[in-house]
Amino acid sequence: MTAPPSALPFDFTDARGRVSVRPAWTRAEIFATVEALLGEWESTLPADKNARVVIKPNLNNDLVALTGNCADLRVLTALIEALRRRGYTRITVADGSNVGIERRNISSFRRLRIDRLAARSGVHTVDLNRDDGRRIVLHAGAEPLVANTVLDADFLISVPKIKTHAEAGLSCAMKNWVGICVGQDKRHMHQDLGRNIFALSEVVQADLILVDGLVGMEGNGPGDGSPTRVGLLVMADDPFLNDCVVARLVGMPVVRVPYLQHALTAGVVSQALLDRIDREVPQVATIQLAPARSRLAVLSESPKLVWLKKAVRPIVSQPAVAELAYRANITQDVYGLEDDSLRVAARNPSACGSCRKCEDFCPTGLRVEEIGVKLDLPDCVQCLYCWWVCPNEALTLSGEAGAMQRQIDRYKGLIEAL
Ligand code: SF4
Ligand code: SF4
């Protein structure tokens, strides 16, 4: 049974830590909520304003945030501005996208407009796939390089999503941490994925977690699921407690999340805690679980068959073969190599219904009267969120769609309907 919105906000506290759950959806709500949450958690922040603060969002892929795949630029902007107001001067946004993105040398920072947002906000970016790292010993022979930018940070803020994951069940704070492994070393995690996700969160700890639970992804996540409105921001100081609470919030059974099962077996969380979460935490959404993976998909991820995967890569990388593999449910991702050059060109006042949805989704706070007035407004980072959510085709774009065309065909209608 899904709880009514009146069940929010609430806090859950346990010996492991604390989780604060707040409703939010529009830009104004997101900015006010992030500011209020940081105020409540002020004592957690570093005393030294020159501390190296590293924000590690989930930039798993090049899918626009409103698909539910990646961190929402509104949340990142709100967090950066709230930190800046508190005087922090050395803020870095860092992540390493998935191995398919990395192997093709695609910049998710560029495609997701993280680079433009960072330039506007005056913060640094680091692609962890290109970072130096240090080896961390995990399980089943896994010994991935973990990025120095993360290991050397003074204060680490994890910004995960809430999404289904075909292999891991759920992706939230613990799964977000896979992105701190450098480049193809993420493959080490698959030598025993559930156990290694659990182990990595034990070895490298985030100081603070801010879950972007605005648009989640359900179904065939993380690469091909559907966006779903969850409408939450969650702040926590413990990834294990956070993920148990989030699983309950969206109706994900812990038994479907192997890394949480490992946390239970290891005694990091107890059955008594899970029972208490079930009793006290409201279920506010029902996320559609990931479908069972095809036998070929499971085989393709087997660490024993990495040699075969490498041998056939030149063939399966051909666009037509990649499309076939996608349609046969063997892979979730089809990567296009051409960056888009799309920009918001104009707003047609006669088509505009004045719903102001574009404003609610604009990370930089542009008003509907400003959006589309001219190309390349100084405060516009060209994220296109306004265009994605506009229900009336009132905004037009200029430029080439490139790899974005596939996303548009798959997701435009779903995002408009959020
Ligand atoms: S979302 Fe579209 S229809 Fe609504 S105010 Fe903005 S431009 Fe107009
Ligand atoms: S005006 Fe549109 S494209 Fe520009 S920053 Fe705002 S939402 Fe993004």
Image (spheres, grey):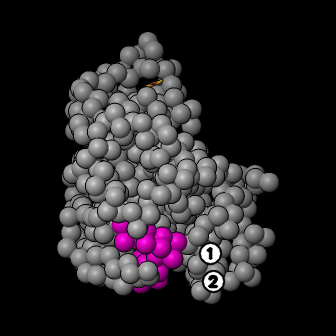
Q: Residue at x 50, y 43 (%)?
A: 329
Instruction: Kindly identify which residue carries mark 2.
Output: 265
**Magenta highlight on residue 203:** yes
Residue 188: image location, x then y, percent? 37, 72
- Horizontally, residue 51 falls left or right of residue 294, namely left
Q: Which mark is residue 181?
A: none
- Horizontally, residue 260 falls left or right of residue 253, namely left
Residue 189, picture quadrant? bottom left
Instruction: Kindly identify which residue carries mark 1.
Output: 261
**Magenta highlight on residue 351:** no
Q: Main secondary structure of the magenta part?
A: helix
| Residue 201 visible in the displayed image | no
Residue 398: image location, x then y, percent? 26, 24
Image quadrant where one finds the C terminus: top right
Q: Label 2 to label 1, Cα distance in Å? A: 6 Å
Identify the magenta region: 187-209
Local SS, label 1: helix
Image quadrant where one finds the N terminus: bottom right
Local SS, label 2: helix
Q: Residue 108 versus residue 293: which sits nearer the camera?
A: 293
Q: Residue at x 65, y 49 (%)?
A: 288
Q: Residue at x 59, y 80 (%)?
A: 263
Q: Residue 238 versus residue 186: which sits nearer the camera?
A: 186
- Tell me which amino acid carries mark 2: Thr
Q: Assess mark 1: CB under 8 A from ligand 2?
A: no
| Residue 347 visible in the displayed image | yes
Asked whether the residues under the numbered discs 2 and 1 touch, taking CB atoms below 8 Å apart as contact, a structural biologist would say yes
